Amino acid sequence: MDEQSKTPAAGDAVFLGPETKIEPLVCGWYAWTHLISPLQHAMNVAYRHIPLLKSFLANPQVHVAASRDPSLFGGPFVNLSHDQVPLVRQLLLDTQQRCARLVALAEDLKKLDVRLQEVGRGYSLHEMYSRPSDSLSGLVEFLYRRIARRFSSIRCWRGMRTRGMDG
């Protein structure tokens, strides 16, 4: 180890001290179980993270006030102060850039579901297979739920994990 810079040289043994905390991030966000599957990750980024950041940027004082109110604990508010608006703006830009493919995937899935609800009236869903976007082609199947035969739904295949949807 170089004594002046305290930088380990190649081959030096290093370790993390017991006070070290590791918090894994996914696209700059705290990694939680709903960000592991690419499809859930896409839906959370597109319809939770990005709208939340936009809401904070549009009206930070509402988020600051809501964060101070114990009755609203756990609500969809950003717990930051006014002076952190530039950081949130940068996080939003970074998220939009890093997760552009995930956002497109979420939008494609939402559009596909809207079309499916229009077509799915208890008859064949065969025509839906010619309609998925490129991001979903070959990764979805269409079905009716056994309980309510007129309720159509989409099943996504695990192969989606290998499509490079890592954000």
Image (cartoon, rainbow, N blue to C red):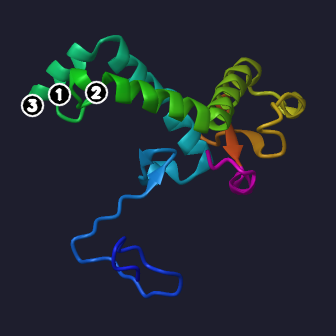
Disc number for residue 67: 1
Disc 3 to disc 2, C-alpha distance: 21 Å
State whether residue 71 appears in this view: yes
Look at the image and give the residue range highlighted in magenta. 157-167
**Mark in the foreground, 3 or 2:** 2
Q: Earlier in the sequence, mark 3 or mark 2?
A: 3
**Mark in the foreground, 1 or 3:** 1
Q: Which residue lies furthest to the top in this view?
A: 58
Task: Using residue 4 as the reference point, say whether residue 132 is left or right of it.
Answer: right
Which one is in front, 161 or 17? 17
Q: Is mark 3 on a helix, strand or loop?
A: helix
Disc number for residue 70: 3
Disc 1 to disc 2, C-alpha distance: 14 Å
Query: Within the magenta stretch, is there residue 162?
Result: yes
The 10 Å Cα crowd at callout 1, few under 14, some 14 to 19, many 20 or more, is many
Residue type at tag 2? Gln
Residue matched to label 2: 84
Q: Quadrant of the N terminus?
A: bottom left
Instruction: Residue 59 in the image: state x and y as whole percent.
Output: 30, 12
